[in-house]
Amino acid sequence: MGGASAEREVSLMSGTGVLAALHGRGVDAHAFDPAERDLGELRRVGFVRAFIALHGRFGEDGSVQGALELMSIPYTGSGVLASAIAMDKTCTKDIWLARGLPTPAFRRAATLEDARRAVNELGLPLAVKPSREGSSLGFSRAESPESLEAAFTLARQYDSEVIIERFIDGAELTVAVLGSGSAARSLPVIEIRAPAGNYNYQNKYFGDDTRYLCPAPLVPEVAREVAEISLAAYRAIGCEGWGRVDLMLSRADSRPWLLEVNTSPGMTGHSLVPMAARVAGISYEDLCLNLLGSASLKIGAASSRNRVNSEVA
């Protein structure tokens, strides 16, 4: 928990919740902040598995996953490759497009001139965000060529590469996924209704005005389609253990559009995976224990040897 990313504050909140849940179930669990301690201590102290509650860079991008693989410490969530891909929104969308999955048209932008060309190619309005960041940090909506410069400048504060994406007007949805491969399953769809449609960092974690509808008020056919597309998007990236897929549902034709996948979702009091799990009959404590039980190594044959039974605590 913690770490050195821009999402450190949220990670500390997630980690605190997970730690309390594991303690409540009798697990000998300890907080470990890689921003304050050398990762090598994990092996020297003798930890047998790691629950990753890190968000953003150095925790969700394959970095810590690679270190844990080298130390042969089983860990929760996706492996090195899937984590790295999912952290990069443009790379993720390239894979989805290759698989025929629906995602809004986009352009990469390293310069303001790139961003201006995107207006001509994609039209307005546009979603502008850093390619490798989470929690809506650096995100804004450009309604005009004039507002594009400010949006691009904000996004560039978080990443050297900016993604310019066609804005989809409609309902904001998210789907939590548990498991791996063909065994992966989706939890109930959540619709997010944020003040003025602005589901930003403040409204995500610290405000009480955002409404969450779970299950989302969708007709059964649309709910099934959203769940199926989310599972396909999760599998296409090679995600394991758990994750969360974010989508927009077009107001014009109720068509779902994939935005991104999170491989280390939040576990705070405002977080969405615990919310969906609760509706599915899974308590926060059971969710944490089950995720810890799924901890494994992912590279080579070591994966099967190090998978931890979910009943072991």
Image: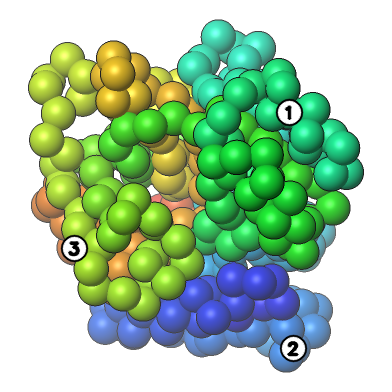
> For the point 14% across and 41% down, which residue is it?
215
Q: Secondary structure at mark 1?
A: helix
Q: Quadrant of residue 221?
A: top left
Q: Evaluate if marks 1 and 2 touch, with contact meaning CB atoms under 8 Å apart.
A: no
How many numbered marks have been drawn onto this rendered protein structure?
Answer: 3
Q: Secondary structure at mark 2?
A: loop
Mark 1 is on which residue type? Ala
The quarter of the rendered structure image containing the N terminus is bottom right
Mark 2 is on which residue type? Arg
> For the point 59% across and 71% down, which residue is it?
7
Which residue is labeled 3 in the image? 283
- Rendered image: mark on residue 37: 2
Q: Quadrant of residue 231?
A: top left
Which residue is labeled 1 in the image? 118
> For the point 38% across and 32% down, which residue is it?
169
Residue closer to the observer: 61 or 109:
109
The quarter of the rendered structure image containing the C terminus is bottom left
> For the point 49% across and 17% down, which residue is it?
102
- Does any portion of residue 64 appear in the rendered image? no
Does residue 80 sit above or below 184 in this rendering?
below
Residue closer to the observer: 92 or 252:
252
